Image (spheres, rainbow, N blue to C red):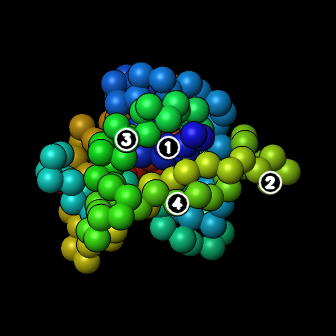
Amino acid sequence: MLYFAYGSNLDWAQMRDRCTSARFVCVATLPEHRLAFTRKSMGRGCGVADAIPDEGWQVWGVVYEISERDVGSLDRSEGFAPGRAQNSYTREERHVFSNGDSNKPVATYIYFAQREVHAPLPNAEYKQLIVEGAKFWHLPPAYVAELEKIEVA
């Protein structure tokens, strides 16, 4: 399975812990979306990442290849169970653009949050996972600078 990560799973250590089969494929963008924090994680105690539709924006992240044996582990870490009525996130198939190039679409799975009305801000530790992951994968400096501006609780 190809998976597009844009939140804390940008952190390579966390991703390898969750999915030992994970292999980096490419840097990519999800067009017409922006990064937001729309849900509270009970485990982390803070707001967690979501990609919400927004014209003119794009979310940068990375595409990983994950073996079928790790898909269940990733689903559990994202609070998703196929067929369950209430999930923290849903897993949907979407196209992203390799290296931000609209001529290079890649079909991936992406987790989108089940949004909450009054979600809290992320904490500094969670934000750091995203920022350091973005730097590790060499996402564009302007995007990293925007991530560094994220307000924390």
Q: Amino acid at mark 2?
A: Ser
Q: Earlier in the sequence, mark 1 or mark 2?
A: 1
Quick one: quadrant of the N terminus? top right
Label 3 or label 4, whichever lies nearer to me, is 3
Whole-percent x and y of residue 85?
Answer: 28, 70
Proximity of marks 3 and 4: CB atoms separated by less than 8 Å? no
Quick one: quadrant of the C terminus? bottom left
Residue density around tag 4, few if under 14, some if 14–19, many if 20 or more, within 10 Å: few
Question: Could you tell me which residue is drawn at 48 percent across and 46 percent down?
Answer: 6
Q: Earlier in the sequence, mark 3 or mark 1?
A: 1
Q: Earlier in the sequence, mark 4 or mark 2?
A: 4
Question: Could you tell me which residue is drawn at 44 percent across and 31 percent down?
Answer: 69
Q: Earlier in the sequence, mark 2 or mark 3?
A: 3
Q: Which mark is residue 102?
A: 2
Q: Which mark is residue 72?
A: 3
Proximity of marks 2 and 3: CB atoms separated by less than 8 Å? no
Secondary element at image label 1: strand
Say which residue label 1 marks.
5
Say which residue label 4 marks.
92
Residue farthest along the right direction in this orientation? 103
